[in-house]
Amino acid sequence: MLRTTLAGLRAHKPRLLLTAVAITLGVGFISGTFVLTDTMNEGVAKTFARSADKVDFAVVPTSEDPNKGISADTFRKVGALPGVTDVHGVVKGDAALVGKDGKAVGDFPTVGISVPSGALLRYEVDKGRPPSGGGETVLDGALAKREGFTVGDTVTVLDGNDRPHRFSVVGLVDFGIDQEAKFRGAVGFDTATTIAMTGERTYREIDIAGGDRRAIEAAAGPAGRVYTGPELGAVLAKSAGADTEIIRTGLLIFGLVAMLVSALVIYNTFAILIAQRMREMALLRCVGATRRQVFGGVLAESAVVGLVGSLLGLAAGAGLGTAALLGVTRLDAAVPVAAPSLTVRTVVLGLAVGVVVTVLSALPPARAATRVAPVAALRAEWEPGGGRFRLGRARTAIAVLLGAAGLAVGALGSLGMAKGQAAMYSVALAGAVFFLAVIAVMPALVRPLGRLAGAVPARLGGVPGRLAVANARRAPRRTATTTIALTVGVGLMSLFAVVAASGKATAAHQLAEQFPVEFQIRTQDLDGRLPPALAKALRERPEIAAVVETRGRDARVGGEEAEIGTVTPAALGTIVNPEMKAGSLGAALAPGTAMVDEGTAAQPGRGLGRTIQVETKRGIVPVTITAVYGEGAQISGIIVPEADFTRYFGAVDPSDLFVKTRADVPAATARAAVEDAAKPYPAAKVVSAAEFKEAMTRAIDTILMIFAGLLGLAIVIALFGIANTLTLSVVERTRESALLRALGLTRRQLRRMLSVEALVMAVIGAVTGVVLGIAFGWAATNAMAEDSRFALPYLQVTGYVLLAGAAGMIAAVLPARRAARTSIVESLAHD
């Protein structure tokens, strides 16, 4: 039986090629993910190991709170220990670099880091030397290149109070081992200057040369943890590797989607192959093969196909991983990578996934091969999935149960639960359950959907068009399995498109409704302050209609930390217009009152009508909550009247300024006026509402593009399924095609018939996916937040259907050419 199976594989190589391609793509994506992340992890580990080799011991804070570092007293004790030859305390805090435009660079302040000049220097100096005096600094190499600075330049850096200081650049340094510095950019000073610039009084780490571990542990006390150099390298590499774990998890999710689609393609392929070889199977039964041998032969065949596809997938995965590494290094040259790594784990996992998925997908067709009596199979031809499909009681019950469960869970998540992460997870679960119901009923939907999708092609395509529509509808099971594979990819892409469009619409609505201003001025530091003189200068400008100041202060409320804020009184209800959920805005302006957002109101003791105890400079003050406003506004937390805020905490500089310009002032003139007023203050960042909206839109579009690219693999596999189905169908319908040719159908018309058939199948899958994607996109949007706004990107989802149809027709090119080239005489003689 094994020899027969192998002979069958050799005889049907073309038929099984596309099946192997489907599994190759799925395994290739998964193995490529592991190659990418394993190689990045190896590069990270080597980089940190090289860095940590320069220290004998390191003391790091036991607490993960960055505000609780190692004290100066501990630093002195460690430095005085016998055997310690050198010691360096790592100081790190905000120190914003000012660009050539006079403004602090980036969306976040650059990091100020102490850089030693001796043997404990763990950073790579690309050019120049480390700083050695109060007037010298080094810059992160990538930051310097981006901002146009080099060794010998003079730069301005802001200290913790936003006061400017001038420094000479003496070196360019690679701070790549510091993840925070890599993200925000960094400037380096000697230790004393770093303390002065950042205002930090504790150390993030103490690096030590020489010494004894026990003595260092005793000096560090319970506030510090001691590592050797290799231990420190492993800890740092592990923490940095968390990023690659997130990348791996995300990519593997898309890889599993690809494997699901591959499984549908494999199942359909084997179902058709078994049907076409039913006479062959029956003959084997007649000559003595048992049901178990036939079943085992089909599974052995699937295992060989899965093994071959998986091996090809591993090779493809190595190539994909290497290509992705090249892309990563081009986007960010500072990312440490090693040579591409194909581990034993990746090989074993790739082979296991590919073979198991293929064998499991072939199980139903293998069982079907044993159920037909030998004599009946020899007498009759059987087309898989052919004829009118009936759901049956069991399938109907399962479909109804799954559909009802999916709708119920989706309604609960979208309409019945508190908005947020849990509600969105419920919608995701509902979508998966409902999709199983769609799989169950899809064969029954093929005929009506095929009539709908084929209405225009049948009318415009003449006889070939009508034949194509009839062919797509006459094998419901086969067409359903083929189209469901495409439904998965298009449905997920449609869902993400709807969620993205809804996110844009929600943010734009909130911006327009709650803060109808043209500009926002803020600092890079989320806790930073703006000088009051800036607000005064803006109000004196004739182009400015109004300036809104927001202030905030951390305070203890009922024994717990909370933020108390306030807004310019004249702006409330006009420029600042939060949606009131309970109480009124007027009631929240009375002395001794406050309004809170819904999240704060949900906390114990902070609901409407409750009195909270706020610790102020004047002691504990009772404040009554008289209003609750909706989340999503630019203000948040506990908001009190401005007069009360000043009485509680004294004069506090504003944290944000919102600027409304006069209606008759051109946008360019208004922007110039605001920029001119903010020019003397390097830390003040001017952001226009249009720029904010554009940045938000660009970020969402980028994410959507990444998702589309990753889900595109599932769509490609589904198109291979369409091509596979048509290829096998051409073989199956050889005599039928020849008869049509003999009756006058031309080669071009035959090719058109198969192309339209592929078009109809692709449109059925795409339309089903779009409908599901829109429905659950709406549910996911409702589950996000109370004030979410649903938006349907009509052009985008219509484009998905059109692209799917075009791609389906392209997938039919080779099967159509094969059918058209076949000899009429030989085909009529085919048995």
Image (spheres, helix red, strand yellow):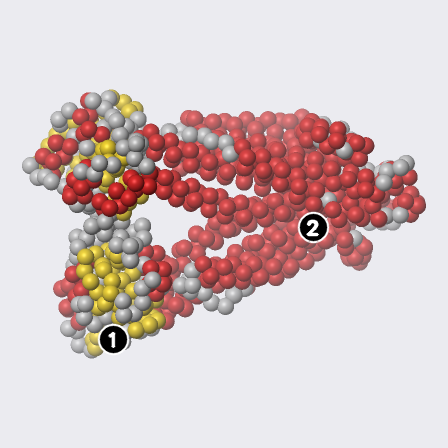
Q: CA distance from mark 1 to mark 2?
A: 61 Å
Looking at the rendered image, the quarter that the C terminus falls into is top right
Q: Is residue 589 left or right of residue 423?
A: left
Label 1: element kind: loop
Label 2: element kind: helix
The picture places residue 2, in percent across and down from the top left corner, at 77, 57
Q: Residue at x 33, y 41 (%)?
A: 668
Query: Mark 1 highlights which residue?
Result: 118
**Quadrant in the picture for residue 608:** top left
Q: Work out whether residue 207 can be spotted.
A: no
Q: Is residue 702 left or right of residue 620?
A: right
The picture places residue 458, in percent across and down from the top left corner, at 75, 30
Q: Is residue 624 above or below residue 481?
A: above
Looking at the rendered image, the quarter that the N terminus falls into is bottom right
Residue 19 is tagged as 2
Q: Is residue 779 left or right of residue 279?
A: left
Asked if the residues shown at circle 1 and circle 2 are in contact, with their CB atoms under 8 angstroms apart, the answer is no
The picture places residue 642, in percent across and down from the top left corner, at 15, 32
Q: Nearer the viewer, residue 399 or 747?
A: 747
Q: Residue at x 15, y 43 (%)?
A: 533
Residue 343 is tagged as none
Instruction: Estimate how packed mark 2 is, as few (under 14), some (14 to 19) or many (20 or more) residues with alpha carbons within 10 Å.
Output: many
Could you tell which of marks 1 and 2 lies nearer the N-terminus? 2
The picture places residue 328, in percent across and down from the top left corner, at 47, 59
Q: Farthest residue to the left: give it.
A: 618
**Quadrant in the picture for residue 147:** bottom left
Q: Nearer the viewer, residue 330 or 370?
A: 330
Q: Residue at x 42, y 30 (%)?
A: 789
Q: Amino acid at mark 1?
A: Gly
Q: Amino acid at mark 2?
A: Thr
